[in-house]
Amino acid sequence: MNFQELNQYNSTIVTFEGKEYRSTQNPYVTDDNTYYIAHAVDENNEEYEIAWLITHEDYENLEDETLACDWEAPVDVIRL
């Protein structure tokens, strides 16, 4: 999917260091259970990986994953 096809209904949209990114997949937990990660694109369709720090100590048992992280404040965005 490209940036223009992604929206609040099919993507996690974040702003990091003044730039907007839109996820192209559902976030998933890293093997060390520290972060949620998702691939994303910017307005130029360049590919990135977004990382959110898991802040809820019992995130695995949450019924609502929106409480697991601060989804509006990723800790890092890395160009792929």
Image: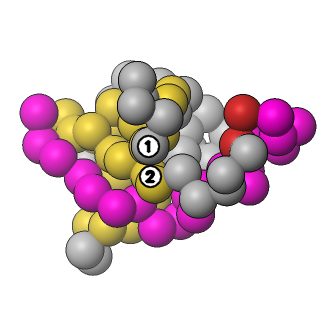
Task: State the SS at label 2.
Answer: strand
Q: Is residue 21 visible?
A: yes
- Estimate how packed mark 2 is, as few (under 14), some (14 to 19) or many (20 or more) residues with alpha carbons within 10 Å: many
Report the residue at 51% width, 28% height from top: 28
Q: Amino acid at mark 1?
A: Tyr
The secondary structure making up most of the magenta span is: loop
The magenta stretch is 61-80
In this rendering, position of residue 14 left or right of residue 60: left
Q: Is residue 12 magenta?
A: no
| Residue 65 magenta | yes
Callout 2 amino acid: Trp
Residue 37: x %, y % from top left: 40, 36
* Of residues 23 and 69, the one drawn nearer to the viewer in this rendering: 69
According to the image, label 2 marks what residue? 52
Question: Quarter holding the C terminus?
Answer: top left
Color scheme of the displayed model:
secondary structure
Q: Which image quarter holds the N terminus? A: top left
Q: Check disc 1 and report the residue beneath it.
A: 35
